[in-house]
Image (cartoon, rainbow, N blue to C red):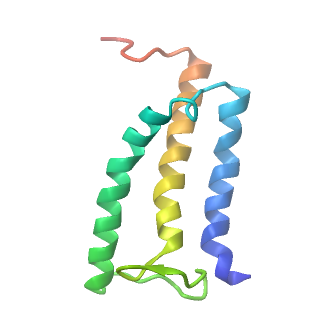
């Protein structure tokens, strides 16, 4: 079961934030283009960074806590999931706070 530890953490991040989409009607998932434009640059930069860091032995991933599915560059699949889930959870949380507080984009300018 330890092999799924990293994925379990990502699952908790999704469960902890996805409900905001439905209960607070943040519409993050409905604005697909905006979501992709927000996550894609971060995803690309950090995948390149991770592959480089792994190739230089700057860091590694515990094989006992990952599934063992490695992508080119010895990047665990869990790391790709991380680069999608954490920005999504962050955006959902930000939009939820904005919805509750009634903040509009560009307010205070």
Where is 53 relative to 108, above or below? Answer: below
Q: Position of residue 5 (x, y in %)?
A: 65, 74
Dividing the picture into quadrants, the one containing residue 74 is bottom left
Q: Is residue 58 visible?
A: no
* Residue shown at 57% from the left, 18% from the top: 101
Q: Position of residue 76 (x, y in %)?
A: 48, 77
Q: Nearer the viewer, residue 28 or 109?
A: 28
Where is 28 relative to 10, above or below? Answer: above
* Residue shown at 25% from the left, 85% from the top: 56
Where is 8 relative to 65, above or below? Answer: above
Tally of marks: 0
* Residue shown at 38% from the left, 79% from the top: 72
Where is 12 relative to 106, above or below? Answer: below
Q: Position of residue 73 (x, y in %)?
A: 35, 80
Q: Quadrant of the C terminus?
A: top left
* Residue shown at 62% from the left, 21% from the top: 100
Q: Is residue 39 visible?
A: yes
């Amino acid at each position: 079961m330890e092999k799924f530890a990293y994925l379990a953490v990502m699952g908790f991040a999704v469960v902890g934030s996805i409900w905001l989409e439905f209960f607070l009607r943040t519409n993050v998932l409905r604005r697909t283009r905006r979501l992709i434009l927000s996550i894609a640059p971060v995803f690309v930069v950090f995948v390149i960074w991770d592959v480089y860091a792994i190739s230089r032995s700057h860091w590694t991933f515990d094989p006992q806590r990952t599934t063992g599915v490695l992508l080119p560059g010895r990047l665990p699949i869990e790391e790709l999931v991380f680069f999608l889930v954490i920005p999504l959870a962050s955006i959902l949380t930000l939009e939820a706070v904005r919805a509750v507080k009634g903040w509009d984009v560009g307010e205070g300018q």
